Every structure is written in C-alpha cells, then in structure tokens.
Image (cartoon, helix red, strand yellow):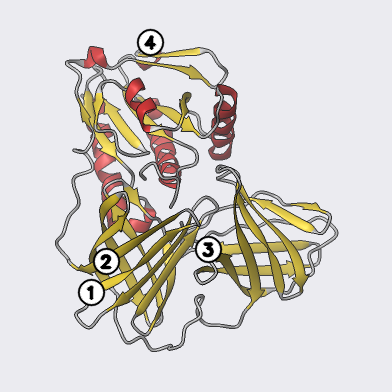
C-alpha cells in the first residue's frame, strides 16, 4: 500500500524458551509502544508460562503473525518477527512487567520504546467509561491529510459495547486488522505486525462526524476525518494502472533470478501459459497477504497452466542483499513459483522496468496475462482478509478469471 513503508495490526505467535526460563506470570498482558510522550499504541498479549516453555500470543482481531524462536543475550530477550526484519528486545523487570524496545531493521536507526504489563482490564486501551456515548459501527467515507496531500478511504468499523474492530480500505489496499476501544465519544484503533505500527484516534461530534489523528510509528502523522456513507465507492482497482504498449510484444522483462542468473520474459517456460506478474516487496504487509493468496492460486491451478512471476523490490542496497531478503521470504512461505529480483524499492525503478505500464501507484500491483501473452487485467493494491466480503469477492472474481483464461 503506497510507497511509504507503513501500515499495522495485532499479531499472534508463540515461542519456546530453552533454560533459563523467563520468570513472568501467565495471563493477559497489555503491550505498549510509546510513539510520543503523550501518544501510546496499546495492544493485547497473552502469555502462558509453563516451566521451560513460554508461549506468547499478540492478537489483532483474527490476525495471527508468527515470531521466530528467541535468543537470550545476557539479561535481554531478542524475538524476531517471522515476516519482517524487525524484533522485540526486552528485559524482565519483574514477574508482571517487561520493558525494552521494538527495532525495525528495515529502516536505519528506527526503534520505539516498548513495555508490557500483566493486566486484569477488560479493554486494551485505558478508558474512563465502559458505556460509550457514541456509536462508531458502520461504513465511513474518510479522508487523510498531511503536508503531502489527501488520501480518500473507507472506514469499516464494528463496535460491540466498548470494544471495536475494523480497518480502512484505500485504492491501494487496506490497513489490515485493527482493534481497540470506544471511550465516551472517542474511538481508539491500533495494529502492530512487526513492520508497521498504526494508531488511529478519532472523536465523534454531535453531528456524527469524526475528526482525529493517525500515527504510523514515529515517522508519519496525519489528520483524518470521516462521515457515515453506505454508498461511497473508491476507484476500481482494475482501472488505476493501465497497459500502454501497442501490443503483447511490448511486454518484455529483464531481471536476475535469486542465484544471479539472467531472467527474461517471455520465454519457453511461460509459453501458452496463463501468467500473473506480481510487483511486490517483502517489507509490504499487503504484499504478504497477496502472496499468501497467490500461493493458494498456484497450488490449485499450476498443474492446469498457471504460472506466477514475483518481482521483488527490496530495501537492500545491493543485489545480494535484495536476493537474500527474497530467499528468506521464499522459504518462509514455501513458495514454488518463479521469484526474481527487481532491485531497490523506488517508484521510478518500477517504471523503468515496466515500460508498458502507466500510473504505477502501489505495491503490490499484479498483471494477469492470457495464454497468448495479452494483458487481461491489471490490479492495483490488495485488500486482504480484514476487509471481509471485499476480500472474498475479489477471490471469487480472480478465480473465475483464471479459469476463463485457462480454458480459452
């Protein structure tokens, strides 16, 4: 979603500690990322500590995101997120408190203070009233504004008493699973996936309009407003990026495989095949969601004639660094499709490589090509499981398209 490396949701994982064990109590914990002195992102942690085995789960709605096995260095615990090059580093203060920092290795010198404590609270965010004054349930036309301009979105919120879940849908993807609470007339939503840390705070006025702040980690801040609107629609994701070549002969790609050998498209491997070209980056949470779905497509349709080419644009400065990031991604998701290195992540690089495209605006972008080599569809962004019916409708439409293209 966009090029700004941000986005967020609560995660769930487990890991087992070799001796010595971490001496903390089992139960519900509240995690806190201190974005500023006054603005804190809260999330729920579940800890089950049994002798030599400590299971930790961090939840964001229905989302589950794994962390790797931890390492213990002196009095500090290091736990890396499986899907991103980031980690939590913390010390045990006592049996009911840990404290440390979240370190994002994708960015240079980027870390945020982190702490967690055992809690008996029924809500994640500290609130003053368990009976909300305002109702945030429903569909909201939303606007995000900062010094760079305005982005229009759709807020999809579900409220159950003081608890709330939801997401924001944009033309380039969704903000994934968000959850939080309603305190009187103010909505608090957040998400944390190891790569992105989102905090949304919005107050509803007497006219039913919302105004508030959106923070992505410590590096981005914008004002957002919203009003209820059940009919507003975003631009069609299949019409944003377009094919501008004169014919299929203009669809030419030149990259390197993960081992450094040359890759060219078209070639015999993809002759008379339906092909999806996925433009993505391993740092991109929407790309990760799309990859999980594309793996399902590949497993289901590869034997019938579907091929997928994943072109990865990475944060590494060299080919070797980019390739290493993509190889780890390939192993993590057990991907069998073709994966090539696009290079360093920047918009102009994609436009230089894909000269037959116009108005490239988002990671991910996917190009669907029929068996004759013609473009059948170009889809901008990816709206994942947090969008509910929007996601399931997209899956049904995509599978209908693939079956039509295979049977042509």
Residue 381 drawn at (x, y percent): 32, 42
Q: Secondary structure at mark 4?
A: helix
Q: Residue furthest left?
A: 231
Badge 4, how many Cα within 10 Å: few under 14, some, many 20+?
few
> Residue tagged by mark 1?
209
Compare residues 200 and 219 and report the one nearer the observer: 219
Quick one: 375 or 284, which is closer to the camera?
Answer: 284
Mark 4 lies on residue:
268
Q: Quadrant of the N terminus?
A: top left
The CA distance from mark 2 to mark 1 is 7 Å
* Helix, strand or loop under label 1: loop
Q: Quadrant of residue 24?
A: bottom right
Q: Secondary structure at mark 3?
A: loop
- Which of 146 and 95 lies nearest the eye of the viewer? 146
> Disc 2 marks which residue?
225
Rendered-image quadrant of the C terminus: top left
Measured as percent of width and height from the top left, residue 319 is found at 55, 22
**Sequence order check: which comes first, mark 3 or mark 1?**
3
Nearest to N terminus: mark 4 or mark 2: 2
Under circle 2, the secondary element is: strand
Marks 2 and 1: CB-CB under 8 Å? yes
The span from disc 4 to disc 2 (Cα, nearest Å) is 52 Å
Point out which mark residue 35 bears. 3
Query: Which marked residue is nearer to the observer: mark 3 or mark 1?
Result: 3
Residue found 50% across the figure and 61% down from its top: 10
Mark 3–mark 1 distance (CA, rounded to whole Å): 26 Å
Circle 3 packing at 10 Å, graded few (<14), some (14-19), many (20+), is many
Mark 1 vs mark 4: give the one in front.
1
Q: Nearer the viewer, residue 356 or 220?
A: 220
Judged left or right of residue 389, residue 262 is right
């Amino acid at each position: 979603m966009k090029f700004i490396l941000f986005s967020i949701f609560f995660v769930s994982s487990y890991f087992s500690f070799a001796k010595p064990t971490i001496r903390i109590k089992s139960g519900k914990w509240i995690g806190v990322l201190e974005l500023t002195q006054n603005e804190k992102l809260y999330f729920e942690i579940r800890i089950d500590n049994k002798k030599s085995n400590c299971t930790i789960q961090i939840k964001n709605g229905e989302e589950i995101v794994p962390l790797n096995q931890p390492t213990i260095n002196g009095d500090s615990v290091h736990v890396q997120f499986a899907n991103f090059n980031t980690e939590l580093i913390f010390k045990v203060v006592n049996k009911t408190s840990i404290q440390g920092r979240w370190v994002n290795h994708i960015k240079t010198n980027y870390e945020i203070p982190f702490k967690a404590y055992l809690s008996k609270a029924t809500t994640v965010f500290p609130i003053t009233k368990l009976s909300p004054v305002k109702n945030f349930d429903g569909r909201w036309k939303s606007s995000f504004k900062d010094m760079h301009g305005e982005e229009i979105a759709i807020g999809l919120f579900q409220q159950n008493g003081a608890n709330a879940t939801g997401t924001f849908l944009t033309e380039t993807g969704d903000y994934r699973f968000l959850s939080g609470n309603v305190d009187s007339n103010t909505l608090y939503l957040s998400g944390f996936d190891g790569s992105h840390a989102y905090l949304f705070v919005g107050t509803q006025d007497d006219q039913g309009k919302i105004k508030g702040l959106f923070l992505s980690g410590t590096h981005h801040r914008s004002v957002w407003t919203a009003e209820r609107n059940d009919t507003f629609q975003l631009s069609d994701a299949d019409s944003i990026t377009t094919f501008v070549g004169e014919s299929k002969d203009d669809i030419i790609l030149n990259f390197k495989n993960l081992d450094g050998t040359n890759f060219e498209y078209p070639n015999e491997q993809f002759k008379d095949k339906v092909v999806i070209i996925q433009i993505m980056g391993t740092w991109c949470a929407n790309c990760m969601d799309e990859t999980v779905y594309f793996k399902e497509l590949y497993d289901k349709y590869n034997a019938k004639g579907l091929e997928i080419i994943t072109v990865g644009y990475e944060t590494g400065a060299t080919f070797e660094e980019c390739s290493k990031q993509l190889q780890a991604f390939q192993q993590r998701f057990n991907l069998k499709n073709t994966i090539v290195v696009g290079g360093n992540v920047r918009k102009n690089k994609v436009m230089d490589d894909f000269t037959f495209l116009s108005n490239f605006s988002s990671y991910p972008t996917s190009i669907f090509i029929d068996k004759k080599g013609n473009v059948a569809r170009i889809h901008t962004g990816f709206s994942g499981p947090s969008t509910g019916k929007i996601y399931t409708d997209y899956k049904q439409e995509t599978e209908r398209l693939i079956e039509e293209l295979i049977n042509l």
